[in-house]
Image (cartoon, rainbow, N blue to C red):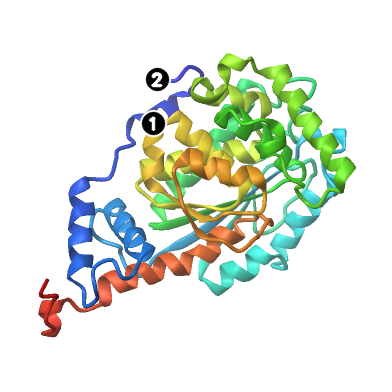
Amino acid sequence: MIAGTSGMLAEFLEEIVVPDPAFLEQARTRLDHLTKPPGSLGRLEDIAARFVAIRKGNPEWPLRKAAYVFAADHGIVAEGVSAYPKEVTRQMVLNFLEEGAAINVLARLHHAELTVVDVGVDADFGDLLGLLQRKVRLGTRNMLHEPAMTEDEMLGALQIGLELATGAQEKRQTLIAVGEMGIGNTTTASVITAVLTGQPPALVTGKGTGLEKRAYEHKIRIVDAVIKKHFRQKHFGKNAQPLEVLRCVGGLEIAAMVGLVLGATRYQIPVITDGFISTAAAALAYTIEPRVKEYLFAGHCSQEPGHRFLLEYLGLDPILMLEMRLGEGTGAVLAMPIIESALRLYTDMATFASAGVSGASV
């Protein structure tokens, strides 16, 4: 058991299993017998085989697709690391609820049930219809000067994700996209990425929402200063302690996404990561429990430079390369029809035997 885990988290971790290799082999065998040259569908075949193995040989039509968007504020915004003011987090949550954001458009188009969760927005939303209010606190503390969260706050946010995963299982959801909204969270993700991968701040820190050159250089200095405050060199890379990283420099929305990823894995529900922030959460979940990787699909690779380092850390290839840097779960939802197409090919194509088509002779 990892030090600092709550009883609920420990229980979830104990029940995570690797998909049965027999189902993966069964899926690959069927793919090889479909009416096409072996491997001719490229990565679609790997996507289908992995998904089918996760779901124990049965994709379960129709797919029940869902997207979870977690929102929270970050104390580090006080250091001038974002081109946008903190208030934009609150404003975008309202936009989600009015169905005016990109994630609303894509979730509607691809029939994914959208859940917007307030984990730590620095605002009072009252009794707004459609918002799942699970606020732990009004944003994180400024990680440049003190840990972003207490242990209880971190575990509370993690538990929100675990509970939502249980809800997803009860709703029989079979494919989950994770996304976020939080001004300042690319700085948080940059620190997490540097600590987990051992890469220097300048390589993993991007311009976020569009910083100009001087502001971008300032952001890199802030990332470096945060790392030096909270971590010693011996705690980088393979020696990183994921829950300590999350507590000291994480975001409340990132902690909730870590919980959702771990929880979905426990219930054997495939998860699609979105951009830099949600992939940072997935990387923390993977560091806590490496078996998580078997349940992850990378929706896309964003323009944030740290994102590709996280994908390499996870050993995942992105499904899409669209030069996006929006967040919200948009890239993850865009990957859903690709996954669904791969599965339809797997289940609906004829085999050589059923179609009476001759196979290759050599």
Tell me residue 252's x, y (percent): 65, 36
Vertical side of 234 occupied by 253: above or below: below
Does dot 2 land on a helix, a strand or a loop? loop
**Pointer 2 or 1: first along the chain:** 2
Disc 2 crowd, CA 10 A, few/some/many (<14, 14-19, 20+):
few
Give the labeled residue for mark 2. Answer: 1
Q: Mark 2 and mark 1: span between their CA atoms?
A: 8 Å
Image quarter where the N terminus lies is top left
Residue at 29% over, 40% down: 18
Residue 13 disc label: 1
Q: Quadrant of residue 222?
A: top right
Total marks placed: 2
Image quarter where the C terminus lies is bottom left
- The answer, for residue 162, to whether it is visible in the render is no
Q: Is residue 33 left or right of residue 170?
A: left
Tell me residue 117's x, y (percent): 63, 49
* 139, 80: nearer the viewer: 80
Residue at 46% over, 45% down: 165
- Three-letter amino acid code at the position of disc 2: Met
* 48, 60: nearer the viewer: 48
Does dot 1 land on a helix, a strand or a loop? helix
- The answer, for residue 28, to whether it is visible in the render is yes
Residue 158 disc label: none
Circles 2 and 1 in contact, beta carbons < 8 Å: yes
- Three-letter amino acid code at the position of disc 1: Leu
Residue at 39% over, 58% down: 174
* 234, 287: nearer the viewer: 234
Disc 1 crowd, CA 10 A, few/some/many (<14, 14-19, 20+):
many
Q: Is residue 220 left or right of residue 240?
A: right
Residue at 31% over, 51% down: 54
